[in-house]
Amino acid sequence: MNFPLASRLSQIAPFHVMELIKMAAELEQAGRSIIHMGIGEPDFPTAQPVLDAAAVALAQGKTRYTPATGLPELRQAISQHYRDHFAVDVAPERIIITAGASAALLLACAALVEPGSEILMPDPCYPCNRHFVAAFEGVAKLLASGPDESFQLSAAMVNAHWGPNTRGVLLASPSNPTGTSIDPAELAAILAHVRAHQGFAVVDEIYQGLTYDAPPFTALTMGEDVIAINSFSKYFNMTGWRLGWLVVPPAMVAAVEKLAQNMFICASSIAQHAALACFTPEATQIFEERKQEFRRRRDFIVPALRELGFSVPVTPDGAFYVYADCSALSEDADALTRDILHQAGVVLVPGLDFGPHTAHNYIRVSYATSMENLHEAVRRLQVYFRDR
């Protein structure tokens, strides 16, 4: 029996990378060796202090619902984290613990996006961000952004494209798929335009802990009206625990709490108790060591890609991605990545998922894998391009 589906589904595209992952899985089942440089997941396991904290919480029976906004002690720990690492005071009451950054984005869009309203975001950008907007019948207005803007929105772009239906901007810094950040001065100029139009600014900061070339920074230093998304998945290596947080202006707290109560009840209680250990000195040392390993991998893979014939017009300063121009090697990034998978056994991601502007000329390379795998992947790619 076929049921009529909601029309909003037509605005949500399939995730092309998952097709490549399925192909890779089939090749692995057939006995092929595959190096995965596609999925954006740290290869490091959850840190032992976090696992120990989870075990203690389980033994103590801390498995009941928490408040919809999260454990008060976890909200306080995050507030202290902002104070210690970014020299900004963020009241714990403004911090809502969520079931991953995806839930935080869902709550932000539920609270802010009206049907038909436009939200400005760069092209390329993480596809789920625009799909969250579409889920609430808003319009993600993608603005073509290239190397000159570090693949980010600029204040000039926001000013030029703000129209009568525009309601806000959704930014990401550092960004997926590009690994690039918004310069603080440029962000300040963007926020000035947004405020002048009485709009909102949501800044996705889930890769915030993984920045390599500049001092630690958060958009929350630029005013209480900034809405920030963060996560325990990337820097804190807790992907499968599905835990994140949302920072909102004081006037939004009650509205978001109401939404969280109805949509989620609360985030996982065990994950929250485990996450308290993320802010201990022992865990912080582990995370910082892993961050330096990510930086070492970046410093290897970027020049290696350039030597292979890819152009990397902007060296990524954060996350664990390289956005590489493959136009000198192929006119079709999707066809190239499929051929590389089958011929070389290396998973790379075409630009198709990240917006039409760079869909056919760029690939995303994730270096969230071991140096051994990176060296082997480069060796395989050297053979592939030599023998084409």
Image: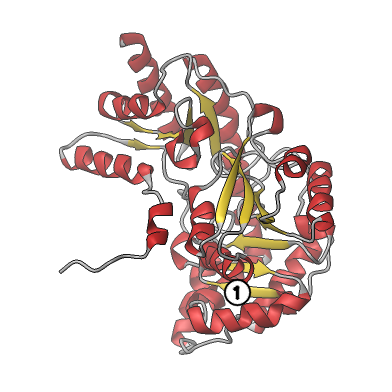
At label 1, the amino acid type is Ile
Q: Is residue 93 above or below residue 171?
A: below
Apparent side of residue 76 relative to residue 192 in the rendered image (left or right): left
Q: Position of residue 246 (x, y in %)?
A: 64, 68
- Residue at figure coordinates x 71%, y 63% from the top left: 227
In which quadrant is the C terminus drawn? top left
Q: Position of residue 164 (x, y in %)?
A: 70, 53
- Residue at figure coordinates x 73%, y 39% from the top left: 157
Element type where label 1 sits in the image: strand
Which quadrant of the view contains residue 178?
top right
Q: Is residue 252 above or below residue 25?
A: below
Q: Position of residue 360 (x, y in %)?
A: 44, 27
Quickly name the residue at label 1.
97
In which quadrant is the N terminus drawn? bottom left
Q: Can residue 264 be spotted in the picture?
A: no
Q: Is residue 360 above or below residue 284?
A: above
Q: Nearer the viewer, residue 354 or 283?
A: 354
What residue occupies the far front of the structure in this picture? 164
